[in-house]
Image (cartoon, helix red, strand yellow):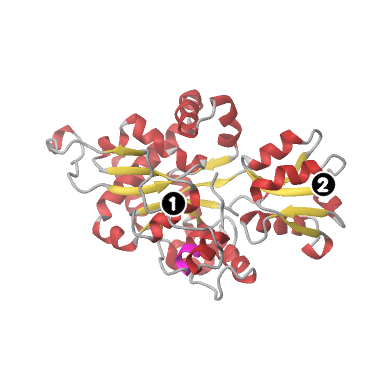
């Protein structure tokens, strides 16, 4: 799964942590969503673009795995855009973007700031979703609320989005991190940390959070990202130069996403969607269903709503705005020394393409 606000990315770039390296080879499984080389007549559909493909790095998070629906349905070709989706583990996907190996990458709003702080800012042109329950505070049996964490040990990977989720959980109960003992635990080790009794609660995202619930009978999620919708936005982030050079093509990519989001919103498509998405990550549809349920996909209206502060980013201070959320995440990152100085978060977003697409959609109705 994606690891939001991945501190190791910054440390990788600054060589502060050993064993972290960029991937020099292309991933073995890239999906081509390429239209025919010859454009069709104007009355036969959208003009096709016989150009070098736009390359998008994506990874294992439902809001990004959903791009496979566009491939399987042939919607990129129908929209007339040449796209190559490249499959990575999450951190290597950002490494590939930083190294200039791809034109765009799927990442969280917090990680977009981290990547930008290392010297390669991006422009988010689309919000795929926000986490709606996949990120959890899971407590051992006998602890049924966040308030009951007072004086307890909580395992969490410090500096990651799970840490920020924990702080929001404590805040909801009138507590702070001074009221608990934080045990710094790598996220992939949180299930065994809870099961062993080394912590009274852990914080993790799927599939680790689900694994923790499974491995310790009687454990329960006492706070999730559904309690703070908008804390974790998942985005399509594009290199600024590619955005300038291929603006019309990126608008077509947005149109494909809007078709995907509408498709996912129709319950009649659920079984097929689960088949396509679970196959991408090697799970059964049944096992993938909870992950899909913990993701709030955003179509045209949702994007416009959460980008609403785009013309006046100063006005967007809450989690309901991707701008406000990013300010909160950015402050958290500076406080935890992910990078030194606060960033101009508004510079990482460009909703102008989305608004142009919205105008085109409305004109067609």
Residue 316: % across, % down: 54, 63
- Image position, residue 242 (x, y; %): 29, 58
Asked whether 92 or 156 is in front, the reply is 92
Q: Residue at coordinates 64% horizontally, 61% vertically from top-left?
A: 159
- Tell me which numbered mark, 1 or 2, is placed earlier along the sequence: 1
**Is any part of residue 312 visible from this angle?**
no
Q: Judge left or right: residue 53 versus residue 300.
A: left
Q: What SS does tag 2 mark?
A: loop
Residue 147 is tagged as none
- Which residue is depicted at the point 26% across and 36% down? 77
Q: Residue at x 53, y 66 (%)?
A: 315
Contact between labelled residues 2 and 1, with CB atoms less than 8 Å apart:
no
Total residue callouts: 2
Q: CA distance from mark 1 to mark 2?
A: 37 Å
> Can I make out residue 45 in this image?
yes
Residue plotted at (37% across, 60% down): 99
Sort mark 1 into few (<14), some (14-19) or many (20+) by Cα contacts within 10 Å.
many
Q: Is residue 91 magenta?
A: no
Number of residues whose C-alpha sits closer than 10 Å to that of mark 2, classed few (under 14), some (14–19) or many (20 or more): some
In percent of width and height, residue 110 lies at 54, 59
Compared across the picture, whether 263 is left or right of 255 comes to right
The quarter of the image holding the N terminus is top right
Image depth: mark 1 or mark 2 in front = 1
Q: Which residue is mark 2?
A: 145
Q: Which residues are magenta?
A: 113-117
Residue hosting label 1 = 93
């Amino acid at each position: 799964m994606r690891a939001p606000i991945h501190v190791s990315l910054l440390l990788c770039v600054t060589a502060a942590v050993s064993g972290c390296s960029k991937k020099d080879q292309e991933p073995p499984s890239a999906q081509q969503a390429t239209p025919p080389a010859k454009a069709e007549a104007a009355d036969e559909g959208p003009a096709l673009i016989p150009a070098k493909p736009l390359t998008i790095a994506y990874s294992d998070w439902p809001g990004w795995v959903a791009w496979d629906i566009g491939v399987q349905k042939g919607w990129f070709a129908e929209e007339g855009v040449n796209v190559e989706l490249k499959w990575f583990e999450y951190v290597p996907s950002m490494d590939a973007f930083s190294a200039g190996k791809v034109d765009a990458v799927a990442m969280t709003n917090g990680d977009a700031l981290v990547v930008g702080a290392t010297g390669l800012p991006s422009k988010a042109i689309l919000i795929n979703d926000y986490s709606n329950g996949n990120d959890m505070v899971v407590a051992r049996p006998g602890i049924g609320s966040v308030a009951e964490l007072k004086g307890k040990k909580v395992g969490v990977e410090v500096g990651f989005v799970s840490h920020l989720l924990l702080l929001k959980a404590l805040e909801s109960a009138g507590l702070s991190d001074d009221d608990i003992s934080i045990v710094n635990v790598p996220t992939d080790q949180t299930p065994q940390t809870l099961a062993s009794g080394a912590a009274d609660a852990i914080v993790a995202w799927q599939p680790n959070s689900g694994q923790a619930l499974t491995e310790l009978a009687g454990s329960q999620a006492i706070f999730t990202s559904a309690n703070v919708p908008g804390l974790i936005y998942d985005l399509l982030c594009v290199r600024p130069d590619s955005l300038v050079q291929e603006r019309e093509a990126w608008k077509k990519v947005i149109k494909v996403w809007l078709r995907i989001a509408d498709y996912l919103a129709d319950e009649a498509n659920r079984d097929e969607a689960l088949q396509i998405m679970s196959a991408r990550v090697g799970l059964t549809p049944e096992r993938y269903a909870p992950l899909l349920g913990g993701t709030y996909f955003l179509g045209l209206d949702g994007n416009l709503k959460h980008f609403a502060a785009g013309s006046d980013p100063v006005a967007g201070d809450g989690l309901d705005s991707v701008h406000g959320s990013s300010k909160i995440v950015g402050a958290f990152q500076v406080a935890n020394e992910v990078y030194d100085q606060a960033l101009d978060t508004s510079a990482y977003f460009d909703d102008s393409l989305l608004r142009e697409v919205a105008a085109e959609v409305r004109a067609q109705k």
